[in-house]
Each structure stands twice: as structure tokens, then as C-alpha cells.
Amino acid sequence: MSIVSYELIDNIGVIRLNYPPVNALSHALRVGVIEAVQQAQDDASEILVLMCEGRTFIAGADIREFGKPAQDPSLPDMLEQLENSGKPIVAAIHGTALGGGFETALACHYRCAVKSAKVGLPEVNLGLLPGAGGTQRTPRLAGAEAALDMITSGSPVSAEKALALNLVDRVVEGDLQEAAIGYARELLEQNAPARRVRDLSAESAEPELFDRYRKQLAKRKRGQIAPQHIVRCVEAAVTLPMDEGLALERKLFLECKASPQSAAMRHMFFAEREAAKVEGLAKDTPTRDINKVAIIGGGTMGGGIAMNFANVGIPVTLVEISDEAIERGLGIIDKNYSITVSKGKLNEDQKQQRMALIQGTTNYADLADMDLVIEAVFENPDLKKEIFKKLDASCKPGAILASNTSYQDIDQIAAATSRPQDVLGMHFFSPANVMKLLEIVRGEHSADDVIQTAMKLAKTIGKVPVLSGNCYGFIGNRMLKPYGSEAQLCLLEGATPAQLDAAMQNFGMAMGPLAVGDLAGLDIGYKAREALTEEQKGDPKTFCIPDALVEMGRLGQKSGAGYYRYDPETRARQPDPEVDELIAAKAAEFGIERRELSDDEIVERLTSALAREGEKILEEGIAQRRSDIDVVYAFGYGFPVYRGGPMFYAQQTAAEG
Ligand code: 3H9
């Protein structure tokens, strides 16, 4: 079957697109649609229906074409043909009509959608803005504020919501083709014209609306170009004629498309999808069924992990050492859900349903029928081995046994069992119910189907999985060490904590490394270093400052002071001259002459430290591919997505010279 087909059903012309997997608007598809619309102008059809085969309506422009030279006809050319068709066109939507896909529907004259469909303009997530009329047509139908919400958030809306917003005309039930043809017949009976959205005018908005969005987005999407450009375009929809608005939209779209930010975000889009694939494993590698899960340890981490499963309807058992500990664990989870309810993201019934899926036990015998057990106790290798021995004795054959360890050797943990093939690492990031990253750690003996099951399960619970080999700290935490060390050297050479953190935050990191240290507690690293030999600890310059801070009783936020001083009420941080003196004294001890460091130098040194360690991780085969490392840093460590992750950023800056 060709990718665009045309069929006359009585007096209704049906244009059908079939370009798996998501009907992305490739060059061939654009050509095909134009030909079909032209063909329909001269036949017996009186009205046209545009619909898609497969799992979804058009999911957008073909992102793979963006890095290549543009080929005519462009998407705006195609939409012009649709909009100017003498015969009305009905878009029939199922799945997700996204980006250029939704813009295609908006260029049609009527839109119907099945109830399960979603429509949206997610271009902002690719560092882009809708470049085929989305910023001009959406406000004409839904109003400027709803358009701003939709386009700057990139979040799709349900068919029902789209109906309420005037973005679709009808929500249909049953077979889509039948329903769409039925709707088309009704339109014919009413002599409905080829109604063009461009002929509507966008209602004028309150004058402060656009400035309000500009300000909000400057905070919420700090550093990003596309969101600000989107506001300009939607403003133009209200203030300028359609063609002028379209011209501005096109100009700003092309500017975004050529920007390093969009290149980085497109890289991340594909990197995220690649990361889920395991080299050497066939797509049809079998997986094990996971219907019952247990978590060992009901602390903050274990509780957060449990929530992921309850959220998707999988029952979870929390294993603790006492009834009080179970109560405490369940209490933390209850509180977390209550916060979600108070934000309006969950209702009380849903909360109760999820809580009902989480049980506690102190008895390993209750784990006999578990499909997966995740150990999430504190980082004590002997304790972990003891737990795995008990799991080996209690769990059924074929149960998957995972450790949430951040640093321990998975092979040593597996060796405590008689079934190392069933053991792997599943490393969640804190807070585990929020952070998207999940490192799946393959031990020497982990079976293929165990790895495949974990990768698939990660998607089920809404995580982004990345496969890691077994080494100290795996991919993410291993890279933190040289990053942190470089930050320490910058301090000794002349940066202040506030300058260093601000430089990294302005670069786009969620937090600077020293503020992160204060948040986590400086005593954690201190204790970890105590267990190391002098050789393992490395260069004293890289830890003398945090060691001294801990010895001064400055453990970070929890003690009211660390690299900064914290207001006991508001937790607001203040630079502290005592710390500046300490740093100067340590620099003098090492004979380091202090100088002014530029913010650019700080950013360059810290990001290069990440990329250098990343290269070693690649060489050693710990990560499957360079882009996986970017995914780890973007989804687990707050590296700005619009910089593309440390590996991409290093390559991009090297290419820029
Ligand atoms: C745009 O439209 C610009 C216009 O405004 C203006 C132009 C002038 N292109 O995610 P999945 C691939 S910008 C190419 O795993 P799901 C994807 O890589 C675009 N390929 O499935 C994967 O390939 P593989 C605005 C695409 O069911 C396969 O399809 N649109 C595209 O979990 C399956 O994808 C968007 O940003 C694409 N547009 O989710 C929507 N989309 O199998 C982006 C997907 O080789 N897409 N692929 O790894 C999505 O959000 C999700 O893919 C979707 C399906 C929700 C559709």
C-alpha cells in the first residue's frame, strides 16, 4: 500500500495516510497528501475526510528531516493546499495529533476525534515552536491564553478538553472511519462550507497577558529561546493579520530550528528512545510477567520506589524490620500522595486506591510469590548480601532480584545467591517517585530476559531506563566524582561557592554542585571517604574543604550551615565569610595563588570533567552509547536538556571551536 491513498466512498473522498510508526510528515507524505487533495478537486466527491492508518493520527513533522536540507513542498505548502481546497475537509483524529499533525488538522475545515485521542503542540520540547500555523490558528479557536498554555507547556489535551476549547468540533464513538463519514454526511446535509480558521479573528487579550507569560517562562523555562518566541507569535495572532502572523511564525520557527538548543533537544528526543534499546538483544527477547513487587526497606527511597508501582496498579509489599518501621514508611507515602492531592493532580479516591495497593510485612515468607523484589536499604555491602541470601531462600524460582544500590558491586551481591542470572541493579534516583531516570545495571551473569524485563518495566512505570555495566557508581555517580573534584579545584584557585553555583545554574543546571552537597549533607561524603585508603581518596585538594567544613560542624542545610549559611526559617542561603576564609587558608596551605575565574571557565572545566569521565565509561563499555550518558545526566542529575547532556555539549562546543 502506498503511504497516501485516496478512495471515493459514494460522494465522500477519503484520504488515508499510512506511514508507520507515527505517520510523521515526511517529504513523501507531504507530496502524497497534496496529490490526493488535487485529485479530489476534480472527481465526484463533495467533501473529504483525512485520516490515518496505524496507531495514531500524524504525530508531527518528521524530526529526522530537521538536520537535513529542507525539501519542497514544505509543510506550510501542504497546509495551504488543504485550507484552500474548494471541498470541505474533515480531519478524523485518533491516537495523538501532535505538532505538525495537529497543525494539519487545524488547516482542515472540520475536526472530529475519538474519545481516547489527544491533540497538542509539543514543539517547545524540541526547542521549536509550531511552524505551520499552530501559533496563529490555535488562538483563533481557543483564545490567546489557552493557546499560550498549550503551546508553551507542550502538553497535549484530551479530545474532550479540545472540544471544550473549540479545537475539535466533535468527539465521536466507535469506528473512526464510519463516524467521520457520518459526520461528513451531516455537514453535507447542512451545506456546511469549507470553513477556514484563518478567517476568524483571535479575540483580543488583556494587555498584561503576554508580559505575564514572558516573565513566568523566563523562570520556568530559564535560558530557553523557543518559549519566548512562542509568546511573540501568539501575540501576533491577536495583533496582526493572519499572513503577517504566519510570516513571523515561520521566521522564528526557522531561527529555532537552526539553534543549538533545538539541535540539543532533538538529540535528547532520539537519545531517550535509543537508551531503551539493548544492543545484542533481539526485540522479541521474552520478558517475565511482573504482577507483584516487593521492596526491601520502607525509607524515603523504598517508599518512593513503591509509589511507582502503585501508580500503575501493581500491588507492592514493603518489607521492614518492625511494625513501627512499616507504619513510618506507609506514613511517608501517604503524606507524599496527600501533597499530590493538594496540588490537584490526584483525587482522594485515586489516592486511596493507590494506598490500598501498598502493604507492609516483616516476614520474608510473604515474598514467596513475588515476581520482582527490589532491595533499597542503606549502603552496607554486608547487609545487602545478607538480604539477598534471605531472598534466595524465600522467593520462587524465576523471581527477579534487584538492588537499588548506588555504588555496590552487583556481582558480589549476586554471588550471595544461588541464582545470579536473576539478579541485577535497578538504581532509582531521589525522589524516586519523581525522577525519571532508572539505571539498569547488568551484572556478569544477569540473564537477557531479566534485563529485557527491567527495561520494559521501566517504561511501564514511566521511567527512562539506561543500561549500565557494573562499576563503582555506575554511569551517573561515577561521573559525579571528577565533576565535584573540579569544583573543589575552582574554589581553591579563586572562585567563591556562590559564584561557582551561580555559574552552573546560569548554565542551566537545576542546582550548583555545592548547593547540592549542602542539601544532601556533607557528612555523607565525609563518612564514605573515611572508609577509603589514602590512594582511593585521591588528591587531598579535591576534598580538604568539605572535610574541614564537616569537622567545623557544618554538615549542610540540616545543621544550618555548610558551604553557605541557611536561614533557619526560610532555608534561604547566604554566602558566609567564614567559608571564604577557610578556602583562602586551604589554598595557602597548598601554595595555590588565587585569581579571578570567569563563569565561562568554571562551566567549561566542570562540564569537561563530566565528558572526560564519560569517555572512559564508554571506552570501558560501561555505557552502551555516548547518548545514553546524556540521558543519564539530563534525567537524573538536572543537566539542562537544551544543552543536550554533557557528551553532546562537549562535542557541540568543540565543533564551534
Ligand atoms: C513539528 O511538528 C514541527 C511543526 O510544527 C512545523 C514544521 C514546519 N518524527 O515515542 P515512541 C519515532 S515538530 C520522526 O517510542 P510512543 C520514534 O523515534 C514534531 N520520528 O512511541 C520511534 O522510533 P524508533 C512535533 C518520530 O508510542 C517511533 O517513532 N511532534 C516522530 O511511546 C515510536 O516513537 C512531536 O514532538 C517524529 N515526529 O509515543 C511528537 N515521533 O522506534 C514526537 C516519533 O526507531 N513523538 N518518532 O525508536 C512523540 O511524542 C511520541 O513518539 C508519540 C508516540 C506520542 C507520537
Image (spheres, rainbow, N blue to C red):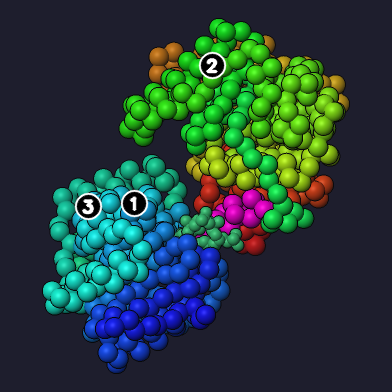
Quarter of the view holding residue 539: top right
**N-term-proximal mark, 1 vs 3:** 1
Residue 190 position within the rendered picture, expressed as x and y whole percent measured from the top left:
13, 74
Q: Which mark is residue 157?
A: 1
Q: CA distance from mark 1 to mark 3?
A: 10 Å
**N-term-proximal mark, 2 vs 1:** 1
Q: Secondary structure at mark 3?
A: helix
Residue drawn at point x = 45 percent, y = 79 percent? 4
Residue indicated by mark 3:
164
Please tell me whether residue 621 is drawn above or below residue 32 in the rendered image. Answer: above
> In the figure, is residue 379 to the left or right of 162?
right
Residue sitting farthest toward the bottom: 42
Q: Which mark is residue 374?
A: none
> Does residue 260 show up magenta in the picture?
yes
Residue drawn at point x = 73 percent, y = 45 percent? 449
> In the figure, is residue 620 to the left or right of 215?
right
> Main SS of the magenta segment?
helix
Residue indicated by mark 2:
329
Mark 3, other Cα within 10 Å: few <14 / some 14–19 / many ≥20: few
Residue 445 position within the rendered picture, expressed as x and y whole percent measured from the top left:
83, 39
Say if residue 335 shows up in the picture.
yes
Residue 529 position within the rendered picture, expressed as x and y whole percent measured from the top left:
76, 20
Q: CA distance from mark 2 to mark 3?
A: 42 Å
Please tell me whether residue 210 is drawn above or below residue 588 in the rendered image. Answer: below
Q: Could you tell me the amino acid type at mark 3?
A: Ala
